[in-house]
Image (spheres, helix red, strand yellow):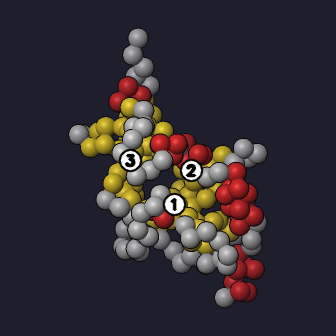
Amino acid sequence: MMDTTINQFLTFTLNEEQYAVPVSKVREVLEYTRITKLPRTSEYMKGIINLRGSGVPVIDLRLKFGMPETSVAKDTAIIVLDVDGGDGAVVVGALADAVHEVVEIPKDQVEPAPRFGTRLAAEFIQGVGKRDDVFIIILDIDRIFNSDEVAMLRSTEAVSPEAVAEQN
């Protein structure tokens, strides 16, 4: 019997490629806003934003994946995600060149991640979906960050927006 379960994904662009994350992981999508840089953090860690009184760490997925840094344009967005950190969810903002739409991709239209020839480590990829002859790389957002990085994100989350405002 074929599995025709429908999975919903939010699609977005990074470096002219189509990516997607499960809708269940997405809290909201924000227009690009000023990001406060934090000292001594990884290059892909852009800083934090104030989201209704909470500090949310923002990462540049392009840098995390070894691509050129995201240049801010009119379509640049921040996707606010719930990342499973093993001992609870961590809220993280991810920069995207542009956010497109929520699409439904049946499970039988998702192939496993290829084991070779991808710029991304296969461990970050949940699968490759196909829609209208376009391949969409489905990210496994919980596996993109190792435990040390989740700990760093969690400590960043603890920084209050007021403390950041005082540093600037």
Question: Of residues 167 and 53, which is closer to you in this image?
Answer: 167
Q: CA distance from mark 3 to mark 2?
A: 15 Å
* Mark sitting earlier along the chain (1/3): 1
Q: Residue at x 75, y 73 (%)?
A: 160
Please state the horizontal and vertical placement of residue 140, each as a whole percent of the image: 52, 43
- How crowded is the residue under tag 1: few (<14 C-alpha within 10 Å), some, or many (20+)? some
Residue 32 vertical placement versus 128 (above, below) = below
Residue 75 vertical placement versus 124 (above, below) = below
Residue 45 vertical placement versus 2 (above, below) = below
Asked which secondary structure carries label 1, the reply is helix
Please give left or right for residue 162 compared with residue 71 in the image.
Answer: right
- Can residue 37 be seen here? yes
Label drawn at residue 144: 2
Disc 1 residue type?
Lys
Please give left or right for residue 42 compared with residue 32 in the image.
Answer: right
The residue where tag 3 is placed is 118
Q: Residue at x 37, y 74 (%)?
A: 73
Q: Residue at x 57, y 53 (%)?
A: 81
* Mark sitting earlier along the chain (1/2): 1
* Mark sitting earlier along the chain (3/2): 3
| Residues marked 1 and 2 touching at CB (< 8 Å) | yes
Q: CA distance from mark 1 to mark 2?
A: 9 Å
Q: Please state, as top left, top right, bottom left or bottom right, where the N terminus lies in the image.
A: top left
Residue 32 vertical placement versus 133 (above, below) = below
Q: Can you tell which quarter of the image residue 148 is in?
A: bottom right
- Can residue 89 be seen here? no
Q: How many numbered marks have been drawn onto this rendered protein structure?
A: 3
Please state the horizontal and vertical placement of residue 143, each as a whole percent of the image: 59, 45
Pair 1/3: label in front: 3
The residue where tag 1 is placed is 64
Disc 3 residue type?
Thr
